[in-house]
Image (spheres, rainbow, N blue to C red):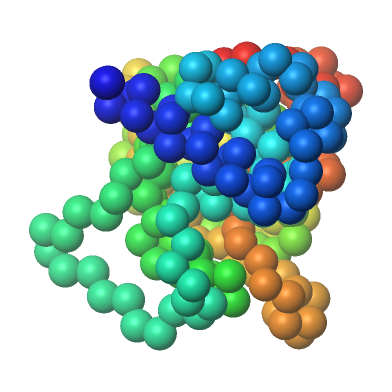
Amino acid sequence: MKIHDEALARLGAHIRALREARGMKLKELADATGLSDAFVSRLERGQVSSSVANLIQIAEALDIGVSELFANPSGQLRSDVTVHRHGDVAESRSVPSTGYRWQLFAGGMPNDDLEVFHLLFPRKNRMDLMVSHPGQEYCYVISGRIRFHVGAEVFELAAGEGIFLNSELPHRADNVGDDEARILMVVAKSSEARSSGRSEHFDWWRVPGAATSTRSGKGKTSQGG
């Protein structure tokens, strides 16, 4: 079995385990996401890849963050100390069929206030969705050129430049360079979630009920990868 096939099998098995842990039938998950029963069944068996838009819908239906679809829960709720040394290599994960790769550098526990990501944008990449979620975020361009869309404004950033934004504003990021682009991203929990003590997980691609397709403008997404 190829590495890609193994990753799909792990993802599918985890989605099934999460669904069953919530007492959801396969049809209930399919209906909640607008995907077909057959597609969800094949996804859970690791027989088909999924677009990031579909993973967003599945995560929403399961009431988790997208990265939790790939995580192996340790039971720990809050990080204590995280240190990175020169030469350390964080685990790199990909979102099937999108080309995106990401590494979680720090944070990521349910009760953490921050998460720090390293994101790799494939060549000539474009996001399909404008996202909006509680909290704040900062993105620092390590290499390449990234065009950030925030509300009606557009900012094109080169290596060494960064952007801080209110994550509740609709936003997306596109790779507009000729090569892969990399950014360092810090995401902060909203003050409301922090004061309430709610356990949340943050994802730069998570869209809690506010997805808007840049192609159709109607918030609809297509099936398949």
Q: Residue at x 50, y 79 (%)?
A: 78
Q: Residue at x 73, y 75 (%)?
A: 198
Of 121 and 110, which appears nearest the observer? 110
Question: Dividing the image into 4 quarters, which one contains the N terminus?
Answer: top left
Is residue 210 toward the left or the right of residue 82 in the image? right
Q: Is residue 154 visible?
A: no
Q: Position of residue 108 (x, y in %)?
A: 49, 65
Q: Position of residue 44 (x, y in %)?
A: 57, 29
Q: Position of residue 59 (x, y in %)?
A: 68, 44
Query: Does residue 164 lie above or below 122 as drawn?
Result: below
Q: Residue at x 71, y 59 (%)?
A: 166
Query: Does residue 191 lie above or below 180 as drawn?
Result: below
Q: Position of residue 52 (x, y in %)?
A: 59, 30
Is residue 103 toward the left or the right of residue 221 in the image? left
Residue 7: quarter of image: top left
Given the current orientation, which residue lies at the most extreme left position?
87
Query: Does residue 140 lie above or below 215 as drawn?
Result: below
